[in-house]
Each structure stands twice: as C-alpha cells, then as structure tokens.
Image (cartoon, rainbow, N blue to C red):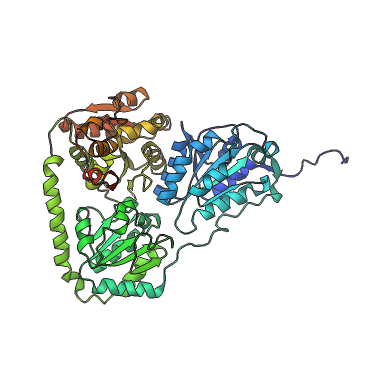
Amino acid sequence: MPKDTPDTSEQLISGGHLVAKALKNEGVDVIYTLCGGHIIDIYDGCVDEGIDVIDVRHEQVAAHAADGHARITGKPGCAVVTAGPGTTDAVTGVANAFRAESPMLLIGGQGAHSQHKMGSLQDLPHVDMMTPITKFAATVPVTERVADLVSMAFRECYHGAPGPSFLEIPRDVLDARVPVEKARIPKAGGYRASTRTAGDPAAVERLADLLVHAEKPAILLGSQVWTSRATQPSIDLVRQLNLPAYMNGAGRGTLPPGDPNHFQLSRRHAFTNADVIVIVGTPFDFRMGYGKRLSPAATVVQIDLDYRTVGKNRDVDLGIVGDPGLILAAVAESATGRLNGGGSRRKEWLDELRAVEAKAIEKRLPQLRSDASPIHPYRLVSEINDFLTEDSIYIGDGGDIVTFSGQVVQPRTPGHWMDPGPLGTLGVGIPFVMAAKHARPEAEVVALFGDGAFSLTGWDFETLVRFDLPFVGIVGNNSSMNQIRYGQKAKYGDARERIGNTLGDVPFDQFARMLGGYGEEVRDPADIRPALERARESGKPSLINVWVDPDAYAPGTMNQTMYK
C-alpha cells in the first residue's frame, strides 16, 4: 500500500457511540434529552445500543426525569442536553437531585477544543457552575477517554450518599472517530466496588441494647431506606422489636397503612415523649426542625450513608455510618432472643400513640368529608387517597396542596411516593410521571399538582401524549401560590397578601384536551371520584382540574418558621 494512502482497516468509533456504549454498560436503557447540535452523535449511538431517546420541551424536565428514573428503578438516570442554555436550563434538576441524594448523570455539550476561549456558540464554564451541586464534574479531554469518564462519573454518583454527576463533552471530542482498541471502555461490572458497609459492630451492638431496653422507642424511616432498598430489614426490625415507625420522603410506604406499627400523625407526640429515637436516612434539616423537635431527654441515634450528615445541627448519642439495610439487619440479629417480653410491654406506648392519631383524624374528619364548594383541599386529598390502589405510584408537585396531601395520602407499597425532596422544587411532577411510567408501564401513576407548580413544566404534558404514557393527573386549582400567600398575609396583613402570588383562573382540563389528553373540570366534591375513575379508564394522560378553596391553608404551611 502506498505511503500516502490512509489505512481504513482499523475499526473506528465516535465519541457519541462511546457514550452510548458506556451508558449501556451502566444499565441505562433511556436518556431524557432536548436536542442540540453539540450532542446529536450521542443519539446515533443510543439507536445502535438500543437505548430509548425521550425528547422533551425543556431541559429542566430532562434532568428531573433522570432523577425520577433513579428513584423508581434504583438504577442511575441520565439526561443529555446541549451546551450553554441547554446546560443552564438543567441546573435546577441537578440541584434537586443533589439535595434529594438521587444518582444521575447529566451530559452537557460544549464548544470544540479548537475554539477554546474564542467565543464559540453556547460556550460557558459549565464545570465551574456544576461543581457545587454535583458529586463529580469534569470535561472529557480526548475521544479515547469518553467511555472512561462516563464510567468514572457514574462511579462517583455512589460515593457515600448517592447524588448527581456532570460531564461536558466538547463537540470535536464527541464527533471524532478513533480506533476502538485505543479507546478505554470499562467492562460492565468491572469498575465498581460494593458501597454497602455494615457500620461499626460495636455501635450496632449498642443500638440493639438500647432498643431492647427502651420503654418508649420510636424510629423514623427516611428516604435512604428506599434508596438503599432496605425495606425488608426495616420491616423485620420494627416487627421484631414492636417499634412505632414513622416514614418520610421516599421512605413512605415501607409499612402499609393499617399496619400495627405504621404511624403518621403522632410523630410530634412520639418525638417529645420517647426515651430512644432512631433516625434512619434523613438529615436534621428544616423538615426535622434542625433536630430541635426531638426530646432533649431522649437517647438519639442517627444512621446515615454520609458521615457528614450524622450529628449535623444536633448532637446525637450514637451515630452509625453505613448502609441502612445492613445496619438494621445486624441490629435485629443482635437483639434476637433478648427482648424477654419487652415488645408486649410496649403495647401501652403504641396504644398511647394510636390514641393521639385517632384524635387528630377525628379533629380533621369534617374537612375530609366536607361538601363545601369551593372544595376543601382535605376533601380532595382524601378522595385521592381512597382512589389509590396497591400499585399506584403517587407523585406530589406543589406547595400548599401537597402539604395537605402529605398528612392524608398513604402509599400502599414501598417506593410508591415521589416528591421533590428537601430542595422544595416545583415542577417535578410531569417529569417524574414521565420517568415512572416509562420505567413501570404496568403501574398506575397518580399525580397531584398545584396550579402554580404545574405551570412550570406543564408543556411536557404533550411529551406524555406523544410517547403514550398515560397517568391520572389532578390539579388542585386555587389560582394562587398559596403557600407564599399565607406567609405574606401573616407577615404583612390582608392588604398585602396578594402581591406577586395570584394567578389567573386557568382551565387545565381544556389544556389537557388541547394536547390530546383527557380533561375534566370539577367544582362539586361529589364529582371528584367519578372524574378520577373516568381519567383512569381513558387510557390517556389526564388532568382533572379541581377548584379548591383558596382560603384554606394546610397546617404545615401555617406552622412554617420562615413566616414567624
């Protein structure tokens, strides 16, 4: 062969196809994306690797959907967006995943290396922007390293408590083709170690001893119980030691409603009067009153995947870092045979808590059954709770209306509750529906939106129609950002309660029908359940627009400390 004739016998592969191969090795079967010229070679690779490409109307939706995919499946999610505004649009979704400890990878485009510092199209310092809200953020320097850096980013998602990673790939790196043998493509399953650690054995033994001898114990099962798939060890420990269990975040549904150890409305009473309190997989953040709501006389134990979380904001008597499932299983094993009737002695304590719950329900009963119009939010969320089946995945996206639902709606199954998490991000509903229905097509998805929350990402209702992802959606419509309105009313008085928080009377049912879905309006509480049933039977993405009382506020809204 002449010297100047190129050798075409080598098998070449592009950067985009290396991305797809690395995603496939990680078990990714779908990417959520909004197209851009910087990233289209990734699509080409995904087609060859059999990875679904779901294209959305806003990059925030793509990032939230990747977060939602991780929560539902336990596998990392992936979103792919273009450079500049494509990446900045996705920042909110990444930040939400960061605070919620959700493992996902955002891949962003970038201008070509050859145009570095020249002012190329959509050029921004993405890595600098993403570093504070990710566990890993980097630029791929050369095509040969594309798959290697993808695998590295995923690996970092699972360092300590899970979280998101970010990778930017310059356009010339992504489009270039290199010999396959020169590209590092980590082998599936060959570059990740187990992150499951069982905690200090001495600390585990001490916790078992504390629980065996406690007279009034209580345990809170937080989001890491679901993240770590620690449902069964949690149930086993609670039943074995006859513990009253409270659940928050993704931990909801660990025990089904009606279970003798399932408690919900007596948490403040329990945390005020318990002698031993175990907090599993949830930080002492604003949701926990920064730890101040726990009795100062109680022995407090905190279990978490992240060392930095244990004892943050409040001293603990015992902190254990590690996988919640392994730790709780070890505690149960250590306590075996040592209770000596202590479980039955706790009946009086559980009866006390059950009486507190019954009193709370009795107080609320008139509102739960209210026939008033506009509809009381408690009546709406009560109807939704009754409507759920054993396999319904419930998604809450809103402020005041979802605060109402948190006191009433009870998922029947682990992993069937989804909310934004501690960042309090509105707009997660439609992307979470998208991820849940794609991952679990056989499951029913029910989503409750505030009208303000739906407006943020609602145009991707059309994406659900386009990809045939049916769900039952409900908008609790009070034409207000009511959680903020309450604070303004409390702080500044009636004359200034409606500054910057009042919305138009939007008929969201018509919006759904316009986009090819099912829509219905409800003004009479007696019509809520029939409308939900018709939405279920429609087999389409749906929105039931329920007009709720704008002057009814959730207790959680009225008790927020930021307004006091």
Q: Which residue is at 64% across, 42% downward?
A: 15
**Where, by quadrant of the figure, is residue 499 drawn?**
top left
Q: Nearer the viewer, residue 318 or 158?
A: 318
Instruction: Estimate the x, y position of residue 350 in percent, counting from the top left.
Output: 17, 63
Instruction: Estimate the x, y position of residue 23 in percent, counting from the top left.
Output: 55, 47
Up-down relation of residue 326 to residue 409 (above or below):
below
Up-down relation of residue 354 to residue 71 (above or below):
below
Up-down relation of residue 271 to residue 98 (above or below):
below
Quadrant in the picture for the N terminus: top right
Q: Which residue is at 51% across, 33% downward?
A: 34
Q: Is residue 264 left or right of residue 348?
A: right
Q: Is residue 494 left or right of residue 26?
A: left
Instruction: Estimate the x, y position of residue 142 in percent, counting from the top left.
Output: 68, 46
**Where, by quadrant of the figure, is residue 68 drawn?**
top left
**Res 69 seen here:** no
Q: Nearer the viewer, residue 285 or 188?
A: 285
**Res 59 seen here:** yes
Q: Is residue 21 left or right of residue 70?
A: right
**Where, by quadrant of the figure, is residue 357 drawn?**
bottom left
Q: Nearer the viewer, residue 131 or 418?
A: 131
